[in-house]
Amino acid sequence: MLLPIYLYGHPVLRKEAEPIEAADNNEELKKLIADMWETMYNSEGVGLAAPQIGKSIQLVVLDGSALAEKFPECENSRMCLINPEIEPAEGAELVSLEEGCLSVPGLSETVKRPDRIVMNWLDENFEEHEQEFHGFLARIIQHECDHLIGKVYVDRISPIRKQLIKSKLNNIVRGRVACDYRTKAATSKR
Ligand code: NI
């Protein structure tokens, strides 16, 4: 089932997401994960965090495989992340690259992030993993994990850039934005 994507300005995108308990490993969660995959692929995104569909829980789906030609590290990167914890890897360097977000349609901005991270997470079967990631895949992961702590990538751009896109952001807050997928704006009258 396709879920509406909550847009920039909606309070749910500003909340700290709750961890998922082992007891939450049930059919309802499986259905939610399946719906998030469907919603992500339908909107041609490479990642979707639960707050973006209105659920303040620590759950992310991502798949950067469509970008593998430009970023080979993204090949076969389909992953479900439950309660992910990330930190920069030793010796990581800050790199600036362009990002977009399904909750901020029509915009993309350059964001500076560490190029290598280490992540601990549970997969959809609640199996624990720890692995290092680099390049654009590390960036997708960091972008999605930001959603779980109430951050959106435009919080990480320069104040000057943010000022320049302010009116566009305000339009998104008001739901005045053309989009190929279903959305839910902060002040939507629908
Ligand atoms: Ni995003």
Image (cartoon, grey):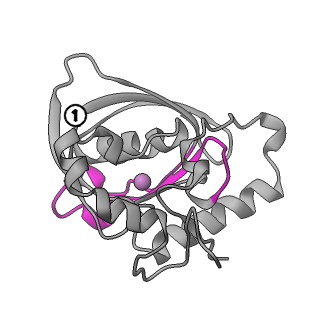
Which picture quadrant has residue 64? bottom left
Q: Give the residue displayed 64% in from the left and 68% down from the top.
A: 35
Question: Residue at image x 15%, y 41%?
Answer: 96
**Which residue is at 49% across, 79% downward?**
181
- What is the crowding at mark 1: few (fewer than 14 residues within 10 Å), some, or many (at least 20)? many
Residue 56: image location, x then y, percent: 66, 46
Given residues 86 and 127, the one toward you in this image is: 86
Q: Which residues are magenta?
A: 54-81
The answer to whether residue 42 is above or below residue 25 is: below
- The residue identified by callout 1 is 115
Residue 39 is one of the magenta-drawn residues: no
Q: Residue furthest top?
A: 90
Image quadrant of residue 88?
top left
Task: Reply yes or no: does residue 56 show up in magenta.
Answer: yes
Q: Is 39 or 26 nearer to us in this picture?
A: 39
Above/below status of 47 relative to 121: below
Q: Nearer the viewer, residue 132 or 99?
A: 99
- The x and y percentages for residue 13 are 55, 48
For badge 1, the amino acid type reads Asp
* Quarter of the figure with the C terminus: bottom right
Residue at x 38%, y 53% (from the top left corner): 77
Q: Secondary structure at mark 1?
A: loop
| Total residue callouts | 1
Q: In screen coordinates, is 38 left or right of 47?
A: right
Residue 79 screen position, x and y as percent: 49, 51
The reply, left or right, for residue 19 in relation to residue 48 is right
Q: Quadrant of ligand 1?
A: bottom left
Beta carbon of the mark 1 residue lies under 8 A of ligand 1: no
Q: Position of residue 1 (x, y in %)?
A: 67, 77
